[in-house]
């Protein structure tokens, strides 16, 4: 039975209609730098693609005019809950200032929409996205990739990290055997007869691309299908080449923003046979390929690929308290050069966001400071939930912390083999370490009493944060047999440290 199930652009996490990339794989960071999540965190039910520095292409059935206009979208998204894409370019949350849904959109026909972003996102990548303007392309059987943060099985959960799956293009004639004349000429189908691999709910609006080296040519926009990954039920995509003129008119004439699509000479004559006659790169300020660093074996800054003793990963695991958006972190090397960071609020304020693991690739035979900040000053535990961080190297937790106040700094040194050591022979910063320890003691004394609680007449429990917010730090309360002013229990929240 034909089950058409487009998913609207919001409420993704608890919407059972939302389905994601089926039987694909987790993409690599930086592999699809143009991917856009139409929203932030769990509050996003569709994808999109950055086809010009200020323009996102998505599906009209995502109803961006209703859900995304004036709201933030996540450009360069890789992890649903984190902007940090290190070592690739970080994602950015950018506001949508205009939305244009295709004027002929109805049901699943003309399933295109364009978003204009408040500010451009300049991709810093060798990879670039172009929109396909050749109706003869892709050829049947062409190997395409579709990406998204949608569900990985029907009625499953949406993905946290971007996934992609390879599906072959099929002709519209073939596709009509499954769906009849619901398949219009401005649609494009892709999938295996046997099913198994497909896009799914939550992937809508995202790109279907053909990859040739660094050039990714967007041929489709995730639109609809009967179920997901079922036999003889290919995924159906809005065919990008059929609405190039509408895109040009919107982007170049109406919005008048930079896009290579609008370039001075965009020849429409397609080059020979099957090869992709695509427009010039749309988003790509193509970076010169990094010259292979042939640096001498002297200590070099820990930029990836330049580590004389090889690289290892530091894993930074967070179990959040109720306020993930209070948390930020940095990793700096021994010269205090920033290696990776996530700025507050890097994590979205989302009750469904409980755990995240960040992977930071660093050089062996080096020391790094991992700094974790809590802007509210009460760490990850325990007044507002029971969180913690773990720092792991080679699968072993080497540091963990929860009640760290405003900041925790942990020094991670890796020997030549990437094994954790407390210091390296050439690391001469012991004096500093002592100072750090003093800071900790001071902060520790200054912490709120995590057990402090007061139950009001309605039976509601109030904590330090509540007293501080209500300006009631001078009130006297009894706790643990002692009656004293609240600021004595709550010096941190009440700012009396
Ligand atoms: N309409 C879905 C969404 O909103 C996408 C469905 C794609 N289905 C498929 N079988 N490829 O996310």
Image: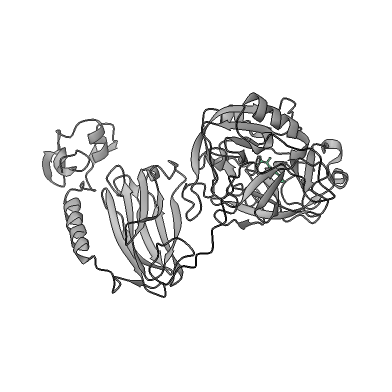
User: Residue 420: percent from the left, percent from the top?
Assistant: 36, 71
Q: Is residue 263 above or below residue 124?
A: above
- Toward the viewer: 268 or 276? 268
Left or right side of 392 for 177: right
Residue at 61%, 51% in the rendered image: 127
Q: Quadrant of the C terminus?
A: top left
- Quadrant of the rendering where the N terminus is positioned: top right
Would you identify the image quadrant in which residue 457 lies? top left
Find ligand 1 in the image and state its quadrant.
Answer: top right
Residue at (66% x, 29% y) in the render: 252
Q: Indicate the position of residue 225 as horizontal and vertical percent values.
A: 74, 43
For the image, the number of numbered tags is 0
Applied colour scheme: one colour
Residue closer to the observer: 213 or 287: 287
Front in this rendered view, residue 429 or 398: 429
Image coordinates of residue 133 in percent, x first then y, are: 76, 40
Q: Which residue is at 26% across, 38% downward?
A: 465
* Residue 108 visible in the shown view: no
Vertical comparison of 106 with 325: above or below: above
Q: Residue 52's x, y, as percent? A: 61, 38
Q: Is residue 264 above or below residue 436?
A: above
Q: Nearer the viewer, residue 296 or 200?
A: 296
Residue 358 seen in render = yes
């Amino acid at each position: 039975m034909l089950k058409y199930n487009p998913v609207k652009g919001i409420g993704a996490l608890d919407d059972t209609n939302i389905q994601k990339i089926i039987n694909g794989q987790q993409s690599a960071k930086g592999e699809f730098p143009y991917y856009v999540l139409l929203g932030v965190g769990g509050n996003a039910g569709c994808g999109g693609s950055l086809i010009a520095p200020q323009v996102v292409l998505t599906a009209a059935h995502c109803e961006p005019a209703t859900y995304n206009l004036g709201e933030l979208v996540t450009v360069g998204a890789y992890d649903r809950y984190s902007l940090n894409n290190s070592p690739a370019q970080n994602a950015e949350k950018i506001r949508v200032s205009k939305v244009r849904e295709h004027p002929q959109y109805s049901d699943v026909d003309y399933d295109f929409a364009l978003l204009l972003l408040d500010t451009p996102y300049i991709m810093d990548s060798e990879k670039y996205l172009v929109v396909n303007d050749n109706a003869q392309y892709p050829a049947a059987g062409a190997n395409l990739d579709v990406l998204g943060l949608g569900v990985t099985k029907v009625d499953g959960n949406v993905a946290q990290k971007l996934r992609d799956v390879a599906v072959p293009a099929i002709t519209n004639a073939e596709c009509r055997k499954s769906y009849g004349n619901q398949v219009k000429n401005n649609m494009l189908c892709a999938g295996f007869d046997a099913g198994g691999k497909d896009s799914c709910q939550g992937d809508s609006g995202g790109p279907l691309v053909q990859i040739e080296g660094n050039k990714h040519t967007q041929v489709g926009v995730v639109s609809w299908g009967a179920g997901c990954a079922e036999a003889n039920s290919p995924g159906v995509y809005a065919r990008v080449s059929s609405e190039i003129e509408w895109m040009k008119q919107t982007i170049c004439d109406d919005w008048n923003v930079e896009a290579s699509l609008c370039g001075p000479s965009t020849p429409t004559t397609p080059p020979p046979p099957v090869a992709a006659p695509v427009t010039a790169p749309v988003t790509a300020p193509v970076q010169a390929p990094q010259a292979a660093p042939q640096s001498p074996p002297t200590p070099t800054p820990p930029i990836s690929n330049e580590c004389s003793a090889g690289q290892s990963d530091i894993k930074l695991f967070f179990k959040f308290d109720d306020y993930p958006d209070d948390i930020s972190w940095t990793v700096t090397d021994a010269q205090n050069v920033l290696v990776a960071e996530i700025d507050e609020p890097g994590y979205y304020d989302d009750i469904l966001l409980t755990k995240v693991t960040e992977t930071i690739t660093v050089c062996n035979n080096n020391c790094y400071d991992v700094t974790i900040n809590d802007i509210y000053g009460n760490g990850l535990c325990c007044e507002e939930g029971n969180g913690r961080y773990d720092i792991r190297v080679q699968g072993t937790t080497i540091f963990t912390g929860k009640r760290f106040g405003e900041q925790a700094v942990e020094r991670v040194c890796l020997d030549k083999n990437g094994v954790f050591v407390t210091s390296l022979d050439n690391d001469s910063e012991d004096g500093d370490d002592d100072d750090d320890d003093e800071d900790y003691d001071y902060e520790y004394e200054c912490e709120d009493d995590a057990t402090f609680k007061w139950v009001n007449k309605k039976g509601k429990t109030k904590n330090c944060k509540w007293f501080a917010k209500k300006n009631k730090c001078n009130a006297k309360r009894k706790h643990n047999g002692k009656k004293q002013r609240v600021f004595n229990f709550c010096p941190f929240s009440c700012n009396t440290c």
